[in-house]
Image: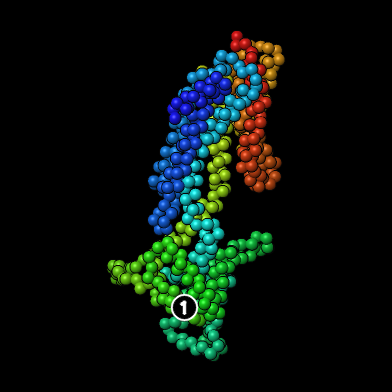
């Protein structure tokens, strides 16, 4: 393999010296292998067994690997720079064609992008493993079953209480012909009123009940005033409540059967059967919830009596039944991480633009001038910040301060461009323009974001509706990528002509 790489490098040296100098072949090979390795680590180190982990990508083990992927990326970048900076054609001659300059930056950008996405490969490997566990369609169906069935697995009474303040809750109607014995022990389980003779008139049952299970509502802000409406999850649960009210036992047992299939599939310990479950909770017409209907999440439970907790074996239990839901939610998340992965990719590409500009500018000038430019930029940032603070100290406008701060760099970029063009037209010496050329290249990837922030804060200054304007931030950075790539083509023409000027 080493012989093959050497042969390819020799061929590139003789025919494509630019590609040889940038070490494109061995480096891309290293980048591809590193991405594949971390993708594999993310895939094979992810345990998709329900209940074995907390379903968080940033678990202790994987978090360390994620940090390691960043370190490996930095080491690859440093190793490449050591070899890349050994030979600099800019220091001996400037390329005969503008395309050579432009191509060198493009290759730097591609290399930086390949290195920056190594942590992304680890994340994608993890998500790929979860997606392999179940299809998206089956995952959504499983979550629908779990959401409906969990209301039939009472462990506490809190979620099954009648809530007076909820206008959508009504007492459960007493069936015709059913007599109610109102003694002191159960009077609070009924809504009632007194007639003129002080007799109690029962309005309905309000004790803990499956029919009072807390549901999911959201507000519809399109109405005035806003109204509460059921979410899709809430509608599915109301469907189960209607089965209970209407005595549709077959549908309830079918739901329990589907849930038990999921329990057995993922080996969730339980001693429940469909029949024992049904007998445990199906008590019409009120479907009460109390200790006699509890289904515990372990094969034992504790009760507090006196000064100590008392151990009791659980008659019926489903161990880690909550993990069943969290597991399928994690699978669904792995399908719906498009936005997160897109944001991460955008950050990686934006960082690659900046880093490639920093590396390229060092090649255009030299390390000494590059370091001087860093110092000058720091001084400029301090001066610009200080001056803008003084200008706006009486105005007390944060927006005006931001506009002044960001606008100064746009003006500086234009000033450097005009200054450089003037030198080229008059065929003057470079002089100290090496420092300005570095700053010019660094500002290219910043032009669109700086312009965006200026417009954003200007709208804020004008007291316009600026809230939705912030939604275009992501779009701005996506636009900045092709803009920078295209603009660097024109900048290469400027850089080539500037490099042709005499040093002294």
Question: Which quarter of the rendered picture does the N terminus lie within?
Answer: top left
In the picture, the quarter occupied by the C terminus is: top right
Whether residue 151 sits left or right of residue 392 in the image: it is left
- Would you say residue 91 is visible in this rendering? yes
Relative to residue 134, is residue 412 depicted above or below? above
Q: How many marks?
A: 1
Mark 1 secondary-structure assignment = loop
Q: Residue at x 62, y 29 (%)?
A: 444
Residue 405 position within the rendered picture, expressed as x and y whole percent measured from the top left: 61, 31
Name the residue tied to disc 1.
282
Instruction: Give how far across and how far down residue 426 sits, in percent.
Output: 70, 12
Q: Residue at the top extreme?
A: 504
Vertical relation: 463 (above or below) 209: above
Closest to the observer: 58 or 259? Answer: 259
Residue 110 locus on image (x, y percent): 56, 32
Q: Residue at x 47, y 36 (%)?
A: 33
Based on the displayed image, in which of its 4 quarters is residue 503 positioned?
Answer: top right
Would residue 361 be seen by someone viewing this image from the given angle? Answer: no
106 and 433: which one is in front?
106
Question: Is 482 drawn above or below residue 255 in the view shown?
Answer: above
Give the image location of residue 290, x and y in percent.
42, 75
């Amino acid at each position: 393999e080493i012989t093959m790489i050497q042969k390819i490098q020799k061929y590139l040296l003789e025919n494509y010296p630019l590609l040889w100098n940038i070490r494109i072949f061995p480096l891309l090979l290293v980048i591809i292998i590193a991405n594949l390795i971390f993708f594999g680590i993310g895939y094979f180190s992810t345990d998709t067994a329900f209940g074995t982990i907390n379903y968080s990508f940033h678990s202790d083990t994987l978090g360390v690997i994620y940090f390691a992927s960043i370190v490996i990326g930095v080491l690859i970048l440093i190793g490449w720079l050591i070899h890349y900076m050994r030979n600099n054609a800019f220091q001996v001659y400037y390329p005969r064609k503008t395309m050579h300059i432009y191509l060198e930056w493009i290759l730097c950008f591609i290399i930086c992008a390949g290195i920056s996405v190594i942590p992304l490969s680890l994340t994608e490997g993890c998500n790929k493993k979860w997606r392999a566990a179940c299809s998206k369609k089956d995952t959504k169906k499983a979550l629908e079953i779990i959401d409906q069935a969990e209301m039939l697995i009472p462990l506490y009474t809190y979620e099954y209480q009648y809530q007076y303040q909820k206008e959508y809750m009504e007492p459960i109607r007493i069936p015709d012909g059913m007599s109610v014995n109102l003694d002191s022990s159960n009077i609070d389980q009924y809504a009632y009123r007194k007639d003129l003779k002080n007799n109690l008139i029962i309005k309905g049952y309000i004790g803990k009940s499956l029919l009072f299970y807390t549901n999911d509502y959201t507000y519809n802000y399109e109405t005035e005033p806003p109204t509460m409406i059921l979410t899709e999850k809430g509608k599915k649960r109301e469907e189960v409540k209607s089965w209970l009210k209407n005595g549709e036992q077959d549908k309830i047992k079918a739901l329990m059967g589907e849930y038990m299939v999921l329990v057995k599939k993922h080996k969730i310990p339980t001693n429940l059967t469909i029949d024992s479950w049904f007998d445990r909770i199906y008590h019409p017409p009120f479907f009460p919830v109390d200790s006699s209907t509890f289904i515990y999440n372990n094969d034992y439970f504790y009760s507090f009596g006196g000064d100590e907790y008392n151990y009791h074996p659980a008659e019926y239990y489903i161990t880690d039944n909550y993990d069943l839901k969290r597991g399928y939610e994690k699978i669904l998340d792995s399908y719906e991480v498009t936005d997160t992965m897109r944001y991460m990719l955008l950050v990686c590409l934006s960082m690659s633009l900046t880093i490639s500009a920093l590396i390229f500018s060092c090649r255009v000038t030299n390390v000494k001038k590059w370091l001087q430019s860093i110092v000058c930029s720091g001084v400029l940032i301090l001066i610009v910040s200080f001056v803008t603070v003084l200008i706006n100290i009486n105005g007390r406008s944060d927006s005006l301060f931001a506009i002044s701060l960001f606008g100064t760099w746009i003006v500086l970029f234009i000033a450097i461009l005009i200054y450089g063009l003037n030198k080229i037209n008059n065929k003057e010496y470079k002089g100290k323009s090496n420092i300005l050329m570095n700053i010019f290249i660094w500002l290219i990837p910043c032009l669109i974001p700086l312009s965006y922030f200026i417009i954003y804060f200007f709208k804020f200054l004008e007291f316009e509706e600026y809230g939705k304007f912030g939604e275009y931030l992501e779009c701005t950075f996506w636009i900045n990528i092709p803009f920078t790539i295209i603009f660097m083509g024109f900048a290469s023409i400027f850089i080539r002509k500037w490099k042709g000027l005499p040093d002294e």
